[in-house]
Image (cartoon, rainbow, N blue to C red):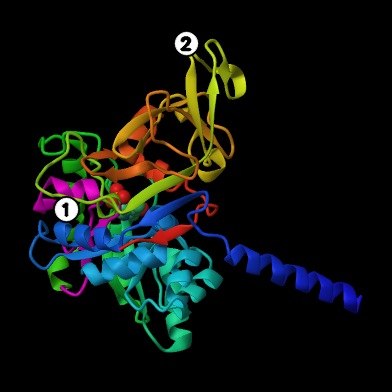
Amino acid sequence: MQSEFRNYQNNVISHSSSLASIDPTQRAWIELSGDAIRYNVRQIKSILKPNCKFMAVVKADGYGHDAVFVSENAIRGGANQLGVATLQEGIQLRSSGIKAPILILGNIYSKKDLLICFKNNLVPTISDMKDCILCDEIGLKYKKQFPLHLKIDTGMSRLGFDTNYFLKNFRKIMNLQNIYVDGIYSHLAFADEDNALDKKSFTQIQKNKFIKVLNKINIKKYPQITKHLSNSAGTLLSQDFHFDMVRIGLLMYGYSPLSPFLNNIKLKPALFLKSKVSFIKHIDKNIGVSYGRRFISNKKTKIAVISIGYADGISRKLSNKLNLLHNGIYYPQIGSITMDQLMIDITNSKNINVGDTVLLLGSDGNKSITPIDWADKSSTIPWEILCAFKNRLPRVEIY
Ligand SMILES: *Cc1c(COP(=O)(O)O)cnc(C)c1O
């Protein structure tokens, strides 16, 4: 047994040391620009209401960009707080040494998890009276007020106190001695969909409902409470939506949720998805390419095999729809995207070689490919494109 165990360990060691010798750009990878994150945070801050705080939303591993990397750069760019979805995500940031306030946007509802939250200096979102009481019990036991944000539902119908229930209970909540109400917030459901500047839009209705609740609880008496409502889309609309803080995800990564693009702000994409040409071949006319033969050549065709596929997070729904960039020229992707590889038509190229790098997302000179382009082609949204990327893609910091 002893020797078997040793052999196993040796295997692991030699295995991992050969892994370490692989160039992360050997096959397919994501390049990340901290400079772009910092630049975007500064740009967004320049349009905020005076004294409005900036929460950098880094849930889902920083929208696929690496949450620690994004958090550090966002803070350097001037972000005041961080937002994550889960307890694990919050703990990961704390264990990498991040000190900024962290709000958990998802619902934490058991006493055990609320205690973990408290001990890791993470701030929970509370949507129910019973959870306020659990937090109060924890604060009492540890003789320290438990900071939390209260959420109210103004029309998203996801998390949040029902507004009437909130109004009925607000006094009771403020009388709990062992919690600290650090924030009150709500979430917009329609800001990237409707013409929100129209007075009758759903986004205006939500904002008015939020203001009405704040007025009814006489919020002026509590200047220490941070009021917040807007995601990226709400933030772009007008300063009327900014309150004391905005919660920014998509914009910080370099993409606008609003179309047509509101050009009062310039952004840089922080993510570049790249892969290598692993093989080149020539096929005749009338030859099928890839599974299902969903591409048939109509002439002699030169093909490059690119070493990235749906197991890396590129939806198979994008088959036959992508364009890849090589030296400033677009090449069409052909046939079904496979698990680990995809093909492009390079018939018109002269100078593409095995080992060359191609760009799938990002910009190259004046040409660019964005997650918004991919989302339009696969009937989804850019958020889903970004957080689909898998850990098989090494993240490489560029500048
Ligand atoms: C994800 C999220 C955000 C950020 O949304 P973006 O549209 O990416 O800016 C803000 N608030 C809450 C509650 C969220 O869940």
Relative to 162, residue 278 above or below: above
| Horizontal relation, residue 142 to residue 251: left or right | right
| Horizontal relation, residue 394 to residue 63: left or right | right
Relative to 69, residue 164 above or below: above
Count how many numbered circles sit on residues in the image: 2
- Specify the farthest residue to the bottom: 143
Q: Which residues are magenta?
A: 223-249
The x, y position of residue 5, in whole percent, is 84, 74
Evaluate whether residue 85 shows in this view: no
Q: Amino acid at mark 2?
A: Asn
The image quadrant where one finds the C terminus is: bottom left
Which residue is under mark 2?
Answer: 298
Circle 1 crowding by C-alpha within 10 Å: few under 14, some 14–19, many from 20: few
The part of the image, by quadrant, that contains residue 367 is top left
The x, y position of residue 270, in whole percent, is 30, 54
The x, y position of residue 158, in whole percent, is 39, 47
| Residue nearer the viewer, 165 or 115 | 115
Q: How far apart are labels 1 and 2 at the CA level?
A: 64 Å
The x, y position of residue 349, in whole percent, is 38, 29
| Horizontal relation, residue 371 to residue 192: left or right | right
Q: Are circles 1 and 2 on residues that touch, CB within 8 Å?
A: no
Which residue is under mark 1?
Answer: 212
Q: Amino acid at mark 1?
A: Lys
Indicate yes or no whether the magenta region holds residue 238. yes
| Residue appearing at x 28%, y 54% in the figure | 186
| Residue nearer the viewer, 136 or 239 | 239
| Residue appearing at x 69%, y 65% in the figure | 15
Indicate yes or no whether the magenta region holds residue 359. no
| Residue appearing at x 32%, y 73% in the figure | 101
- Specify the farthest residue to the front: 350
| Residue nearer the viewer, 307 or 92 | 307
